[in-house]
């Protein structure tokens, strides 16, 4: 099993990243802010504009270290990758599956079943653990509706139909999401999902963590030899990691959403960590982003029993495990892709 390494998040907008021997060096003008050995890293995410030395890019590509660039506001810009890794036969099999309407639909259905199943259990956990603080009847009703949608999703005859069922389930789930916010209701009210740009503090954090997690999944897919840009449900378009967007579906509620809720309910973030622009867009302040990324790193180190492997793993390993299971299915080692089903 792959070992979970660290991801370096460089949040300073004026930082320049360079290579010195086997170390990455973070520079602000001529001042050295810090250095880390490359062998401790599995990824680097930079929120600055000054860039990276070609030598460091080459070293990262050679060592399979994902290098990702984002705007200070958290919008994805680009990823740097080296030579294509993995078995050519595996990628050919992936492309064939992606173009086969029946097979790609079956994989997509499993991803969406995982998404709805996990969303339902997030709601079930809330009714069990916080029944006195929430409208338990309302949340339970939504959970029952999600449970009923799973067999309907299983019977989907087309991707258009599947997207329709997915949208209905997401509407049910986010319709009661505000109930799961137990603290700081005034600063973290939630009236529904909005993005590009997000218009409230909750959506700003959700969009940010979804972007970070999508990048983690894309790196994991490349590591097992799959093409993250060729998906089964999300439409391929230049620069869009479609397969990563397919696999994130089963992890949104259970990993990203629960993480954001914990930031709010544990008062790790507060209303002063955000600013609203004239166009209504809400942005996280630099200090808030640093706090969130530190907590995200801690979350990735927490352990759970993987529902399919029945082994103790770290949360940060789950994207890699799901990518590995998808590769095993495509190679013919498994009869179907097993989605991540959490309780």
Image: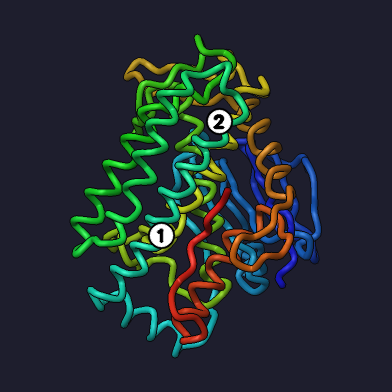
- Is 135 above or below relative to 94? above
Q: Earlier in the sequence, mark 2 or mark 1?
A: 1
The residue mark sitting in front, 2 or 1, is: 2
Q: Nearer the viewer, residue 110 or 216?
A: 110
Q: How many marks?
A: 2
Label 2: how many residues lie within 10 Å, few (<14), some (14-19) or many (20+)?
some
- Image quadrant assignment for residue 18: bottom right
Q: Position of residue 219 (x, y in %)?
A: 55, 63
Q: Please name the residue shown 59% across and 37% down the image.
A: 259
- Horizontally, residue 12 falls left or right of residue 196, namely right
Residue 331 coordinates in the image, percent (x, y)? 48, 86
Residue named by callout 2: 126
Question: If the image is split into quadrants, where does the N terminus sit?
Answer: bottom right
Query: Please, is residue 240 above or below residue 30 in the view?
Result: below
Q: For marks 2 and 1, give the CA distance.
A: 23 Å
Q: Which residue position holds label 1?
A: 111
Q: For the view shown, which residue lies furthest in the top direction?
A: 186
> For numbered disc 2, what is the local secondary structure?
helix
Instruction: State left or right for residue 193 relative to residue 62.
Output: left
Q: Which residue is rendered at x = 50% and y = 9% of the image?
A: 186
Residue lying farthest bottom?
A: 89
Q: What is the secondary structure assignment of the residue under circle 1? A: helix
Instruction: Out of 82 and 50, give the one closest to the viewer.
Output: 82
């Amino acid at each position: 099993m792959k070992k979970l390494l660290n991801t370096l998040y460089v949040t300073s907008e004026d930082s320049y990243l360079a290579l010195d021997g086997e170390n990455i060096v973070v520079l602000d003008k001529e001042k050295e802010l810090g250095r880390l050995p490359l062998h401790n890293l599995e990824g680097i995410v930079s929120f600055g504009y000054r860039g990276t030395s070609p030598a460091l890019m080459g070293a990262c590509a050679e060592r399979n270290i994902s290098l990702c660039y984002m705007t200070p506001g958290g919008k994805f810009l680009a990823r740097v990758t080296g030579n294509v890794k993995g078995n050519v036969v595996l990628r050919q099999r992936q492309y064939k599956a992606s173009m086969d309407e029946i097979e790609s639909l079956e994989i997509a259905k499993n991803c969406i079943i995982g998404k709805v199943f996990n969303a339902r259990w997030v709601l079930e956990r809330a009714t069990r653990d916080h029944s006195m603080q929430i409208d338990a009847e309302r949340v339970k009703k939504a959970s029952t509706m999600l449970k009923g949608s799973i067999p309907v999703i299983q019977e989907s005859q087309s991707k258009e139909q599947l997207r329709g069922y997915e949208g209905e389930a997401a509407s049910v789930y986010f319709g009661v999401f505000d109930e799961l916010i137990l603290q700081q209701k005034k600063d973290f009210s939630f009236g529904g999902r909005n993005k590009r740009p997000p218009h409230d503090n909750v959506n700003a954090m959700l969009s940010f963590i979804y972007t970070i997690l999508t990048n983690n999944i894309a790196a994991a897919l490349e590591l097992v030899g799959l093409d993250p840009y060729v998906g089964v449900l999300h439409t391929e378009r230049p620069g869009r990691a479609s397969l990563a967007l397919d696999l994130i579906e089963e992890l949104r509620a259970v990993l990203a959403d629960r993480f954001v809720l914990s930031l709010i309910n544990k008062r790790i973030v507060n209303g002063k960590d955000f600013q609203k622009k004239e166009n209504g867009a809400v942005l996280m302040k630099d200090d808030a982003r640093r706090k969130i990324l530190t907590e995200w790193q801690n979350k990735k180190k927490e352990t759970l029993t993987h529902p399919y492997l029945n082994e103790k793993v770290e949360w940060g390993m789950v994207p890699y495990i799901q990518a590995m299971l998808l590769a095993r299915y495509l190679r013919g080692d498994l009869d179907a892709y097993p989605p991540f089903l959490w309780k």
